[in-house]
Amino acid sequence: MTEDARPRTSRISGFHKLSAQQRIDRAAAFAGLDEAQRAQLAAPSNIDAHLADHMIENMVTTIAIPVGIATNMRVDGRDVLVPMATEESSVIAAVGNSARQCYDSGGFTTSMSGTQMIAQIQLLDVADPHRGRLVILEQRAEIERICNACDATLVKFGGGFRELEVRVLDTPGGAMVITHIIVDTRDAMGANAVNTMAERLAPELARWTGGRALLRILSNLADRRVVRARATWPCAVIGGEAVRDAMIAAYHFADHDPYRAATHNKGIMNGVSAVVLATGNDTRAVEAGAHAYAARTGRYRSLSAWEVTAQGDLTGTIELPMAVGLVGGAVKIHPTARALVAILQVKTAEELARIIAAVGLAQNFGAMKALATEGIQRGHMSLHAQNVAFAAGAVGEEVGEIARRLIDRQSINEEAAGLALAELRGGR
């Protein structure tokens, strides 16, 4: 029996030991891919296949996400060009347009609470949990010694153990003693560092309390690493009082209704995640932390706040956890990420985090203004129409013409694009 004739099964022994091309062949045979599809998976990208194979397991290909540059950004008095990796139309344009409208009023001002991360250690079966809590707190000096011994390099650069918190949680499964170690991870995102410390510390906590250590891992609710940004948009620049007040009403809606807040905050993360991804950082960690932070009051709310200044202008603020780094992980080994970080001209993780927060606020301004005025579809769909035209087979100058016809006809789909393309080519 030939390989292609074998019964389809996902149980492929030793798949991880195969070369990337062999994995492509096995996956292609399983799915019945044609030669063009096989060739697409094997096509070279701007990351070396050998490097990609060592970044993840069972690698077969890479997927290219377009990276654009957001212009007009002025952050803390410095002009910056911001690389953003996204597949969604209008995201980068919205940031540039929003930044342009507040550029002359100073752009974005940012701050950050610090670069500390939290690791949690869960203890079960502690006979006297409240006594156990105090026993752990009494060992602070030893805990600091154990943690700092795990990463001498981090300590050398000014990081390391900072604080200790211990809580008793009453759960349906009984009381749990939860220890937080707070660690300054400096220019690293810090997951590996704090996880290593938690692993090393867990047996000692169990020994001191007579309990049993279970989970020991970082928390992505990085509320010791909160970044903030603010900016003011002159009322006259954004279209007058009616636009300003409509945007305030849109914010009030988002801050008081979780259904609106979910999409409102998703718009913010359109900008945030695009910069996080472009710089080789962990989008899932940042997104999880942001959404958890949005619910810190007990209900899910807006990550941003909008007000009218004494002068009648519109001012916005944003704050969210921002666990990003410039050392370790993909940030350091992915050549494209390194090049994009170089465009940003940042030297520290804090600088990067501040710029990301400014982008999130700019994105939020752009989305709210569109919603409060022309509606989100007009600007978004004009760009989407170009994608639809391209998918229908338009090339070169045809793309813009087909997109224009789709918008004029208020029918933006691939079937309408195909008809418009046939008309255009038939009329030549």
Image (spheres, rainbow, N blue to C red):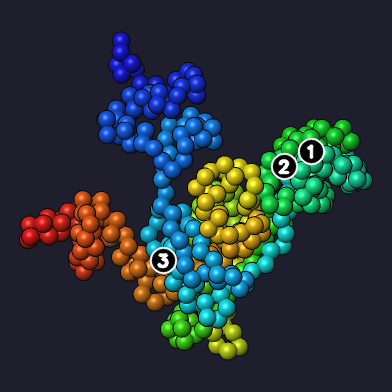
Q: Quadrant of residue 33?
A: top left
The residue at the point 62 percent across, 71 percent down is 76
Q: Which residue matches tag 2?
A: 193
Nearer the observer, 141 or 303? 141
The amino acid beneath tag 2 is: Ala
Q: Viewed as shown, does residue 132 lie left or right of 364?
A: right
The amino acid beneath tag 3 is: Ala
Per the rendering, the mark at residue 368 is: none
The amino acid beneath tag 1 is: Cys
Residue 275 appears at what percent x and percent y?
Answer: 52, 56
Q: Secondary structure at mark 1?
A: loop
Q: Which residue matches tag 1?
A: 150
Q: Viewed as shown, does residue 239 lie left or right of 78?
A: left
Q: Residues within 10 Å of mark 3 (few under 14, many from 20)?
A: some
Mark 1 or mark 2: name the one nearer the start of the chain: 1
Find the distance from the CA under tag 3 to the CA under tag 2: 37 Å
Per the rendering, the mark at residue 93 is: 3
Q: Quadrant of the N terminus?
A: top left
Residue 12 visible in this rendered orientation of the protein: yes
Q: Are marks 1 and 2 in contact (CB under 8 Å)?
A: yes
Q: Secondary structure at mark 2?
A: helix
Q: Quadrant of the C terminus?
A: bottom left
Q: Viewed as shown, does residue 43 lie left or right of 195?
A: left
Find the distance from the CA under tag 1 to the CA under tag 3: 45 Å
